[in-house]
């Protein structure tokens, strides 16, 4: 694969060509001038040409292309919500309203208030709320209901996942979405939803929603305005393609230790405390603060690797099960269905 230099630099990070092409197909479907968008984004080639498959796009190029597309559409949501437009610059204003909050709960309340005051949904009310189940210690963030365009609802749901990635950046923690609901029908093409949601997704629900541990709401917002301005330059890449990993997160550190090959037994909790150089009590407290556990981290690591391997041709389900540490394929089937709501064969 050859790289395209950008300002005489070659970037290590690359964006799958399908993501870049999807942006331009989206623009063309709305009769926008693709040549003008590419020129404004300083693109040295046309991603839709046949030989573009041999070229990768840097995170900087992808982010600029997103910005120029938003400008052409006059909508930072990319047009996925036809009855609720997001004028360019709104993301920055919402982020600024959240950045000086004491914790994530206060930040989300500010974002919801911003939506209620500054955005108008034509034809019906703008549903945007957060609810906390004190019994299960789970929080649910909801946005827009089933009275909107049914075909756009999966895009709205993906937009919620993007907001959760921004929230994760604000607090320097990985936020694991445990389940999601879509106000529209199951889309014919699931690649977009699966990119954001390895968890079970329910369709034909009253509202679009994501559920996560309420412990994250207590986490302090650790970012400042200077960091925000730097983040926004690459926000499309980090919010859509690859979340910015936080080295401050104990979840991230454990995932690095576990790696992505689980044919060998994972470290015990006691061995993990040694590897992290902390007491068992401290580790448990850190995990609880991030709304997770060592078992959940192990399960999610195996789930993510399994999903990645299932997309590779030539690997059987049994081989994927073995690579993820399951000696019994039936146990892998049960676990995978619990993780995603589907069997490995159906998911593939």
Image (spheres, rainbow, N blue to C red):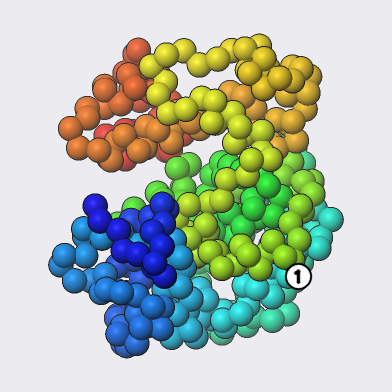
Vertical comparison of 340 with 71: above or below: above
Outermost residue, left direction?
A: 50
**Residue pictured at 55% horizontal, 64% vertical:** 235
- Within 10 Å of disc 1 (Cα), the crowding (few <14, some 14-19, many 20+) is some
Q: In the depicted view, which residue is nearer to us: 225 or 210?
A: 225
Mark 1 secondary-structure assignment: helix
**Residue pictured at 45% horizontal, 42% vertical:** 198
Q: How many marks?
A: 1
**Residue pictured at 34% horizontal, 22% vertical:** 323
Left or right relative to 299: residue 224: right
Vertical comparison of 194 with 296: above or below: below
Q: In the depicted view, which residue is nearer to us: 148 or 303?
A: 303
Rendered location of residue 107, percent (x, y)? 76, 60
Rendered location of residue 208, percent (x, y)? 54, 59
Rendered location of residue 197, percent (x, y)? 46, 48
According to the picture, the residue beneath numbered tag 1 turns out to be 97
Residue 267, quarter of picture: top right
């Amino acid at each position: 694969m050859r790289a395209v230099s950008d300002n005489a630099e070659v970037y290590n990070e690359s964006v799958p060509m399908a993501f870049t092409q999807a942006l331009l197909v989206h623009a063309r479907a709305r009769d926008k001038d693709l040549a003008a968008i590419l020129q404004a984004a300083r693109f040295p080639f046309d991603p839709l040409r046949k030989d573009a498959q041999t070229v990768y796009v840097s995170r900087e190029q992808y982010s600029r292309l997103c910005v120029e597309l938003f400008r052409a559409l006059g909508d930072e949501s990319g047009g996925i919500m036809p009855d609720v437009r997001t004028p360019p610059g709104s993301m920055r204003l919402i982020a600024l309203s959240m950045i000086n909050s004491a914790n994530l709960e206060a930040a989300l309340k500010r974002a919801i208030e911003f939506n209620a005051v500054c955005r108008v949904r034509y034809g019906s009310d703008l549903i945007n709320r957060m609810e906390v189940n004190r019994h299960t210690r789970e929080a649910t963030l909801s946005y827009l209901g089933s009275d909107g365009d049914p075909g756009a609802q999966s895009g709205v749901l993906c937009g919620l996942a993007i907001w959760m990635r921004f929230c994760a950046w604000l607090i320097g923690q990985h936020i694991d979405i445990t389940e999601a609901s879509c106000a529209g029908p199951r889309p014919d093409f699931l690649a977009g939803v699966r990119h954001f949601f390895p968890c079970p997704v329910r369709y034909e629900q009253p509202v679009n929603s994501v559920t996560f541990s309420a412990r994250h709401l207590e986490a302090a917002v650790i970012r400042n305005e200077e960091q925000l301005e730097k983040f926004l330059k690459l926000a499309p890449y980090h919010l859509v393609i690859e979340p910015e990993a936080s080295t401050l997160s104990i979840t991230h550190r454990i995932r690095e230790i576990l790696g992505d090959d689980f044919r060998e037994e994972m470290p015990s909790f006691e061995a993990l405390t040694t590897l992290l150089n902390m007491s068992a009590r401290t580790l448990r407290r850190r995990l609880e603060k991030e709304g997770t556990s060592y078992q959940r981290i192990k399960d999610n690591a195996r789930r993510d690797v399994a999903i990645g391997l299932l997309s590779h041709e030539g690997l059987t389900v049994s081989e994927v099960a073995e690579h993820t540490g399951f000696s019994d394929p039936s146990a892998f089937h049960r676990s995978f269905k619990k993780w995603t709501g589907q069997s490995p064969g159906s998911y593939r």
